[in-house]
Image (spheres, helix red, strand yellow):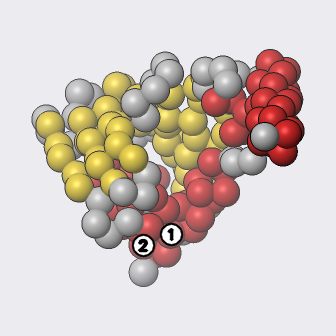
Amino acid sequence: MKILKKIVLVLLILIAIVLIVALFVPKNFKSEKTIVINKPKNEVFEYIRYIKNQDNFGVWQLSDPDMKKTYEGTDGTAGFKYSWKSEKFSEGSQTITAIDEGNRVDSELDFGFGTPAKAYFIVKDKGQNQTEVTWGITGRTPYPFNIMSLFYDMGNDFQKGLENLKKELEK
């Protein structure tokens, strides 16, 4: 019985430490990555405006071929909603909220908890059939889940996704 009490006490102390640390971890987050693609800006923009194309370059979509997907509305336009259910990545949705024609696509990502995050693609002409693409996200993670930001940065997935996008568009 004494050992059980010690184990419970240690577990409670560990949980308390995690909760205390989470008090000091920022709740707001931002992550973005950029790449240059050797294609004209309008061609790149016309590809990334369609959420369904993320199946060809998005790290999460490529990591789970069994992901169940549903769509509402017209892809490539404001209001289009893409939802997923995945054993690996839980469930959520992405809705296009605004399109600045030829320059930017904004969307809302709802992961089923907390306030939905804001995601975006920005394209800039770099001349000579080169386009700079920035993929990013901003949001707020509720306490105590904000502790996870110490262990995970979406930037790595964005970078890999942008590299996949570059390969897809330059082939």
Residue 49 can be seen in this image: no
Task: Classify mark 2: residues with Cα within 10 Å, few (<14), some (14-19) or many (20+).
Answer: few
Q: Circles 2 and 1: CB distance less than 8 Å?
A: yes
Q: Residue furthest front?
A: 1
Residue 114 image point, x, y percent: 50, 21
Indicate whether 17 appears above or below 10.
above
From the image, state whether disc 2 or disc 1 is nearer to you: 1
| Residue at image point 43% right, 34% down | 111
Q: Amino acid at mark 1?
A: Asn
| Residue at image point 61% right, 21% down | 142
| Residue at image point 63% right, 48% down | 154
Indicate whether 96 appears above or below 165.
above
Kindly identify which numbered label has been placed on residue 164: 1
Indicate whether 59 appears above or below 142.
below
Kindly identify which numbered label has been placed on residue 116: none
Looking at this view, is 48 or 139 the one in front?
139
Q: Residue furthest bottom?
A: 171
| Residue at image point 49% right, 36% down | 120
Residue 153 image point, x, y percent: 69, 47
Pointer 2: what residue?
168
Q: Secondary structure at mark 1?
A: helix
Residue 68 can be seen in this image: yes
Looking at this view, is 132 or 22 the one in front?
22
Q: Secondary structure at mark 2?
A: helix
Residue 29 picture quarter: top right
Pick the quarter of the image with the C terminus: bottom left
Residue 31 image point, x, y percent: 67, 40
